[in-house]
Image: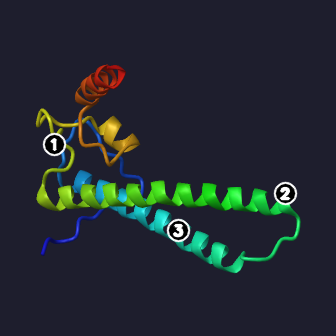
Amino acid sequence: MKAEVFLPDDYQPAEDEPFMNERQTEYFRQKLINWRDELLSDSRDTIETLQDGTRNIPDVTDRASEETDRALELRTRDRQRKLVAKIDAALRRIDEGEFGYCEVTGEPISLKRLGARPIATMSLEAQERHERREKVHRDD
């Protein structure tokens, strides 16, 4: 088991330190765990609201509006469920020492990109190439 890494509250990964050192790794681990916990908390709140909010609404328009709102909420939660799976995959990459490196090129993903999207698996350049190829094949 690894020793805990002290991380000051105001710590931000910097380009002038070794890439994916213990502090950077711990920073992203905490960021991912906090994000996942927030999403799971929102999901629990939604489930409670949907269970408590079941009621018989006599007006057809009001009932349709509420059902639309529920469907939208469930779609949002489904997207968040998929996001939690990506967060878990990123946490596994941290444990395996693969986090922060592009799965296509093996090069480091920029700290700026990881800060904005810590579940990123490709560098910005590799992601752009992937999206261009995807667009070309989609247009066929």
- Dot 3, how many residues are within 10 Å of its Cα: few (below 14), some (14-19), or many (20+)? some
Q: Does residue 8 appear anywhere in the picture?
A: no
Q: Residue at x 20, y 61 (%)?
A: 92
Q: Is residue 134 left or right of residue 9?
A: left
Residue assigned mark 1: 18
Q: Amino acid at mark 1?
A: Pro
Q: Is residue 103 left or right of residue 42?
A: left
Label whose residue precedes the other's in the sequence (1 or 3): 1
- Residue 128 location in percent, x, y? 30, 25
Report, in whole angstroms, how far the alpha carbon at label 1 lies from the one at label 3.
Answer: 37 Å
- Identify which residue, 114 or 76, lies in the foreground: 76
Q: Is residue 120 left or right of residue 97?
A: right
Residue assigned mark 2: 61
Image quarter where the C terminus lies is: top left
Label whose residue precedes the other's in the sequence (3 or 2): 3
Q: Does residue 33 appear anywhere in the picture?
A: yes
Q: Where 42 sits versus 114, above or below? A: below
Report, in whole angstroms, how far the alpha carbon at label 3 lies from the one at label 2.
Answer: 27 Å
Q: Is residue 119 left or right of residue 97?
A: right
Residue assigned mark 3: 43
Task: Determine whether the residue tagged by mark 2 lies in a helix, strand or loop.
Answer: helix
- Residue 57 location in percent, x, y? 83, 71
